[in-house]
Image (cartoon, rainbow, N blue to C red):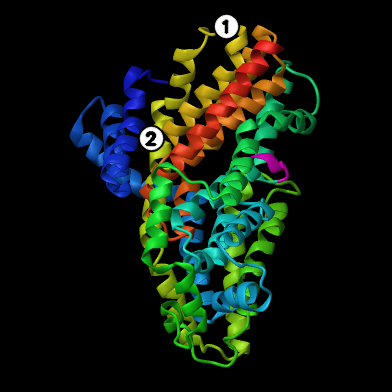
Amino acid sequence: MQDYGIWTIITPVVTIILAICTRQVILSLLIGILVGFTVIHDHNILLGIRGTLEGIIDVFKSSGNAKTIIFMLMIGGIMRLVVVTGGVRALVRLLTNKTQIIKGRKGVQLLAMIITSLIFIESSINQLVSGASTKALAKKYGVPPEKMSYIIQTACVSVCSSAMINGWGAAMMGVIGVQISQGLITGEPFDILAHSMVYNIMAWFSLASILFYIFSNVSWGPMRKAEMRAQAINYSADAITATEESEEPEEDDKDIINHPNCHTSLNFFIPILSTILMVPVALYITGDGEFSKGSGSTSVYWGVMFGTAVSFIWFLLRRVMNVDTFFKELYIGYASMIKISSVMILAFLMGHVSSDLNTGAYIAQVTSGVIAPGFSVGFIFLISAVMSLATGTSWGTFAIMIPIGVQLGISVGMPPEYMIGAAIAGSIFGDMTSPISSDAIVASMATDCDHIEHIRTQMPYAVLTASFALAVYLWLGFTY
């Protein structure tokens, strides 16, 4: 593999800096990808342009990429259906006016966290469902989309990286299994990973921080400005009361079909639950009886196809829609996802360019062999965090860093569980902070939040949490 030296990290650095400065994620990704292809082609800008244009098409050569992009488009269709058939409106009224489960800002934020945490099989599904379930409530109570994006994505990544009985866990066990087969460690992959999860400190601290921010009402940095802006618009307690007492339809209600059967939360639950429940079934089938990374994109693809089919039957049988209306609304939903799907395509291509440049391995290589035993656990966490921030992928990062962590742990006498946990924890940091993270993109979309604003407001919270996690890893390293 060709050694590009320091140029290997130029692409992610350019992309991240441009995204933060310009707040134009598509432009930033395109320029970053162009820089990457230019480096790959011996700094020839013309070949770099050609590589970028062809690379966009090549994204679809991967069936996994294609299925994920189709899923992104089709989930927009389902979300549109549950809105126009009154499903979301009925759910909001069920949680507020009828059952009084959600009575304010804390309630809606806690609901988002709980929904996200319960659906731990697949990260895209749980964020989208949580966003759809709480978006209207968040608007009602003046919780900014930036705060909801933070809660949903942070809870998602933390839970999915710790649940083990999903694609994340299967991928981690596969990496650990290789280390066992090479004779570096002994035991069963499941047992080793289970013990390592105790040391996924970033996940546990992140979940604790969400609860702290929800119940304390504390906010700071860019997030505080977002909260003040949201509440200043017209979401004061008096405005909420006035809205509830008014018989005039809310702005979002204007799209709802005028039909007697558009007043039930079943119009939300039937399409959404049919999509969700199909995912673990498809994971089992496509993974030959196991939850596996390879079947992840297929499972969500199956899920959204099944959910669309069930929605078609449900709404036609209830005469809420006819065939023409169903597909008209479905296509409107698809169209709303064009921007986010474009970002996802470029994010996939960025991952490919980073792989060709060998970015992750270069970062690990230049930092290896320069660390004292006491710093080893914190070192693995820190390098994993930097790598995941640069590449935007937690899976790619822990696939590289778990083996490095295990080998470093053996050389300095640290338990492999410490090193594996630190590698996983560092990997999810980038998932929470990188503008090119697919989970960050989905979280922005699920909450109707500007993507760069989501990154700007979430990053300080993630950095603070990571600082506490690093302190724990240093303590573990020096007290072992």
Per the image, label 1 sits on a secondary structure element best described as: loop
For residue 356, the mark is: none
Amino acid type at image mark 2:
Val
Give the quarter of the figure containing the C terminus. Answer: top right
Q: Is residue 5 visible?
A: yes
Q: Is residue 79 left or right of residue 47?
A: right
* Observer-nearest of 35 and 191: 191
Residue 431: percent from left, percent from top: 50, 40
Q: Is residue 399 visible?
A: no
Farthest residue, direction front: 238
Residue 347: percent from left, percent from top: 40, 44
Residue 110: percent from left, percent from top: 62, 56
Q: Report which residue position mark 1 lands on.
A: 372
Q: Residue at x 59, y 14 (%)?
A: 376
Residue 163: percent from left, percent from top: 70, 43
The vertical placement of 274 against 169, above or below, is below
Amino acid type at image mark 1:
Ala
Q: How many marks?
A: 2
Alpha-carbon neighbours of circle 2 within 10 Å: few (<14), some, or many (≥20)? many
* Observer-nearest of 366 and 301: 366
Q: Report which residue position mark 2 lands on.
A: 353
Per the image, label 2 sits on a secondary structure element best described as: helix
Q: Residue at x 41, y 63 (%)?
A: 337
Q: Is residue 102 left or right of residue 4?
A: right
Q: Earlier in the sequence, mark 1 or mark 2?
A: 2
Image depth: mark 1 or mark 2 in front: 1
The vertical placement of 407 against 270, above or below, is above
Q: Quadrant of residue 171?
A: top right
The residue stretch that appears in magenta: 161-165
Q: Residue at x 38, y 68 (%)?
A: 335
* Observer-nearest of 38 and 242: 242
